[in-house]
Amino acid sequence: MLSYLHGYHAGNHADVLKHTVLTALLARLLEKEKPLRYVDMHAGAGAYDLGSRPAQRNREHEGGAGKIWSAEDAPAAVARWLALVQRFNGAGALKRYPGSPLLAREMLRPSDDLFLFELHPAEYRSLKEVCGKDRRARVLREDGLAGCIGLVPPPSRRALLMIDPSYELRDEHRSVIDALVKVHKRFAGCVVAIWYPVIERRWVERYERALRATGINGIATYELRVASEQRGGGLVGSGMFVVNSPWQLEDELDAALPWLAERLAVDGGASYRVQR
């Protein structure tokens, strides 16, 4: 598991979907005055240089954030995420990409807090350097799926958990579901966002069936594919399972997904799926 480095994939089409959903969730949750706890179970390095050797290897950002960098007609959810990435870069071209910890940190208020988990030693050091001085944040070199259980419910009884594993292990989704069940038993009202890759359709179907078999209600699926699915192919899309979606989230994402499918399409197989 610890061989995975997100720097090779930063800003790609999967990040576009993942972070559009994440920032839309945060926007909705931050409409209420009570403090919000944000827990990121696989926080990564926090920030990524798109000119670095890993990012330049496949230049995946060019088919993701780079493809819509100058879009002026983006739907609200996409425009919100894009504005945060543009603010992170300053004027000019797309050169750096903020991971989920930095996007969340930018949106959260002084009364909110962040718990950021990362096991990879180099990624942890980078994350600590980027976020460690923020008094709201705790950066932890621990297993997030285990560590998150004791963080809910927070005193405010308002929390968003972000689960974004690499899925290097074929059955890693079982650990995600186990953690979700434990979280739900402690705090049924917790909002949870779970990212997953679309490489093999049968694996996605097994994952979704197992998730719904837990009996947890209020699970929505938002999936974006940028290319046709092929046996033995690479990453052609990704999705987000959202537990306890806040009010109005679905309206924003219903507008965002078809726009993203059109703009990020690689071939005629690009599409999107919404299930509630």
Image (tube, rainbow, N blue to C red):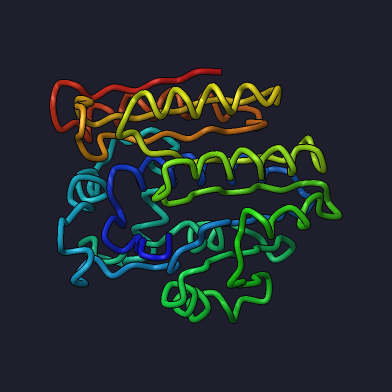
Above or below, 215 relative to 111: above
The location of residue 172, given as percent across then percent down, is 50, 45
Q: Quadrant of the C terminus?
A: top right
Residue at 56% of width from left, 30% of height from top? 249
The location of residue 233, given as percent across then percent down, is 19, 35
**Furthest-right residue in view?**
155
Residue at 56% of width from left, 63% of height from top? 105
Q: Nearer the viewer, residue 212 or 106?
A: 212
Q: Nearer the viewer, residue 72 or 212?
A: 212
Residue at 61% of width from left, 22% of height from top? 212
Indicate left or right for 148 with 18 as reference.
right
Residue 18 quadrant: top left
The location of residue 265, given as percent across then percent down, is 19, 31
**Furthest-top residue in view?**
275
Residue 58 quadrant: bottom left
Above or below, 214 relative to 275: below
Q: In which quarter of the image is the N terminus?
A: bottom left
Residue at 42% of width from left, 33% of height from top? 239
The location of residue 7, given as percent across then percent down, is 31, 64
Indicate left or right for 175 with 218 as reference.
left
Q: How many marks?
A: 0
Residue 8 quadrant: bottom left
Indicate left or right for 219 with 60 as reference.
right
Above or below, 56 relative to 149: below
